[in-house]
Image: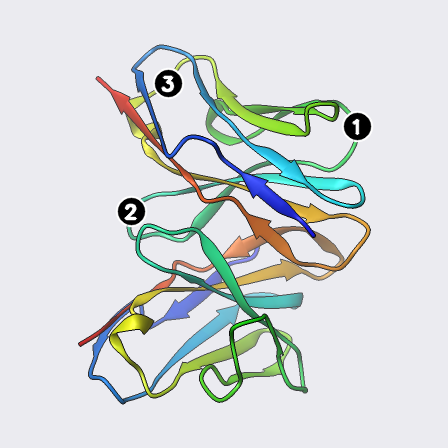
Amino acid sequence: SAVISQKPSRDICQRGTSLTIQCQVDSQVTMMFWYRQQPGQSLTLIATANQGSEATYESGFVIDKFPISRPNLTFSTLTVSNMSPEDSSIYLCSVSRLGTNEKLFFGSGTQLSVL
Amino acid sequence: AQSVAQPEDQVNVAEGNPLTVKCTYSVSGNPYLFWYVQYPNRGLQFLLKYITGDNLVKGSYGFEAEFNKSQTSFHLKKPSALVSDSALYFCAVRDGGYGQNFVFGPGTRLSVLP
């Protein structure tokens, strides 16, 4: 299985600031995704992180608000910009392994609270 | 477009009794179906999947699920529930013919009572 290290595990931030979340995988993976899980809700896909190019965003999510980088096959970052209390959620990094794209592995998540 | 429904927000069962968590889906092509479990303050853990083959799939921690194509269902089951099974369960589907995106259901909270 793929081991995913996601950090920070939690943070409390002030309105208007930005937070960058890091996701490191222990092996090369084909796909990396960022999900949001709002309190008491299911998972919503924010974007697919593409190596060396701009991420592919889902409807309702934009690059200015959620810039994503993926410089190589094992690392990605998600930034939550100009935060408001509505951004308080769990943010989850997820990956599919190289050659076995049948299931997703998840990081432990980042619990973000915006005051 | 893909979609997943989990008709029950909450399922309560007594320890030792069988449990069922329901899931129905909709996809255009062949369904790839998954169950994940989420414990408090944790990420999602994979339980089992159906891609092709036998309709009854067995997974981690004694869980199993049955794929029913005519009813477009993929219910999660366990013969004897444990208190430690109490968690949030998500059904997910990926359309095998189109792209990589997974769609998750709304989740069902399982409470196993001692």
Q: Do the residues labelled 1 and 2 touch (CB within 8 Å)?
A: no
Nearer-N-terminus badge (1/2): 2
Nearer-N-terminus badge (1/3): 1
User: Measured along the vertical axis of the image, is residue A62 above or below residue B22?
Assistant: below
Q: How crowded is mark 1: few (under 14 residues within 10 Å), some or many (20 or more)?
A: few
A109, B76: nearer the viewer = B76
Q: Which residue lies furthest to the left in this view?
A: A115
Q: Which chain carries label 3?
A: B
Same chain shared by disc 1 and disc 2: yes
Mark 1–mark 3 distance (CA, rounded to whole Å): 27 Å
Same chain shared by disc 3 and disc 2: yes
What amino acid is labelled 3 in the image? Answer: Ala
Check residue B81 in the rendering and tell me which mark sits there, or answer none: 3
Q: Which residue lies furthest to the top in this view?
A: B17
Nearer-N-terminus badge (3/2): 2
The x, y position of residue A30, in whole percent, is: 69, 66
Residue drawn at point x = 59 percent, y = 70 percent: A58
Q: Which chain carries label 1?
A: B
Tally the marks: 3
Q: What element carries label 1?
A: loop
The x, y position of residue A81, in whole percent, is: 38, 86
What amino acid is labelled 2 in the image? Answer: Pro
Residue with the mark numbered 2: B40
Would residue B114 be found to the left or right of residue B1 on screen? left
Same chain shared by disc 1 and disc 3: yes
Q: What element carries label 2?
A: loop
In which quarter of the view is residue A6 placed? bottom left
The x, y position of residue A10, in whole percent, is: 27, 68
Mark 3–mark 2 distance (CA, rounded to whole Å): 18 Å
